[in-house]
Image: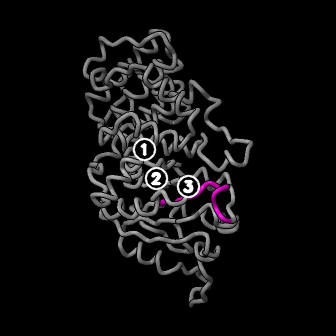
Amino acid sequence: MSTNCALAIAIQAGVPILTWGPPGVGKTTSITMLADGLALPLEVVLASIREPSDFSGLPVIGEEGVRMEPPAWAHRLARAGKGVLFLDEISTAPPAVQSALLRVVLDRVVGDLALPNRVTVVASANPPEQAVGGWDLSAPLANRFCHLFWSLDTQGWVDGMIGGWSISDLPHLPSSWENSIREKEMLVAAFVRHRPHLLLQVPKDEGQAGKAWPSPRSWSMTARLLAAAESVLANEDVVATLTAGCIGEGACLEFLAWCRDLDLPDPEDILANPTYFRLPDRGDQAFAILVSVIAAAVGRLTEERWSAAWRVLAQASEHGKRDIAAVAAKRLAAARKPELSLPLKEVQEFAPLLQKGGLM
């Protein structure tokens, strides 16, 4: 099931997830099996019966003053160094509890205790109309999650009833998966530059504000998940599920269609042969190519790749793309290593900009 694959990727990428679905479809059971399949400790906290102090901490007077003491489940996760914090029934948690969850979800901080980076927050919710005493999620809390919608797979349920329940073939992220995050951030930035109105779209309707929508935060989560999905060769359905879960279906459709239409060349091919490369006339395509080349060069910066990247930027400037190249030039100059000298001929076009920014 693509939802399980998307969940496994997001958990390992450390992106908070909120699974939506009617009661009884197996959200809790699936998340428990996923944690077991990924060898991660699981702490289940029923958000609807908790008080704000269960997440913000209880005040305890000590020698150094008052500290906010977290509950036992937070200490267990901290000792384990990794795990899944599963917040069940979050849509029935009252607004005061939702407010207390803001820092837990975003920063992984419970009381005065910072949870390890390898602890991922997963929550589940029933639609408000199907929850007893349910509330719409507040916009600030909703925007901290990647929203995944649970669909009932009849054949999968039948097979599970007959042969037993299990989750197999889970994707496992390689240790180097984070290396491509910067490249995906550049891709996202190129799209938002082309569609600036999609950087932030807070829904006016309270129900929609409690779901996925574009914001600087959710675009950053999108880039992280795109890198994670690519590292395990996830299929298009999984990529679309994760992207829509962060920025909503409308923005997701525009972004993925734009990506397919870009037809970007391999930045490594450009760095290997910078003299023969010519940028396309289309502005958003040219910008996306340049930022991907700079991201690739910075990711493994050697003297040869440093020089090749500057040659690409100089050629872009010579062929009428000076403004676009200047943005990429600032990024490249900022990544300069002490042993690398600026190629004066190629840098000449950008010298005033770099001097103004203190980069040369």
Residue at horizontal 30 percent and vertical 42 percent from the top: 232
Q: Where does residue 249 sit, x and y in percent of width and height?
A: 56, 36
Residue at horizontal 29 percent and vertical 23 percent from the top: 271
The answer to whether residue 179 of the structure is visible from this angle is yes
Mark 3: few/some/many CA within 10 Å (<14, 14-19, 20+):
some
Residue 311 lies in the magenta stretch:
no
Q: Which residue is mark 2?
A: 15
149 sits left or right of 94 in the view: left
> Which numbered circle lies on residue 22?
3
Q: Where does residue 252 sit, x and y in percent of width and height?
A: 53, 33
Residue at horizontal 61 percent and vertical 52 percent from the top: 142
State how far apart marks 1 and 2 are (Cα).
8 Å
Mark 2: few/some/many CA within 10 Å (<14, 14-19, 20+):
many
- Return the residue nearer the eye: 307 or 126: 126
Find out whether the residues at labels 1 and 2 contact each other: C-beta distance under 8 Å: yes
Give the magenta part as a residue range. Answer: 122-132
Where disc 2 sits, the SS reads loop
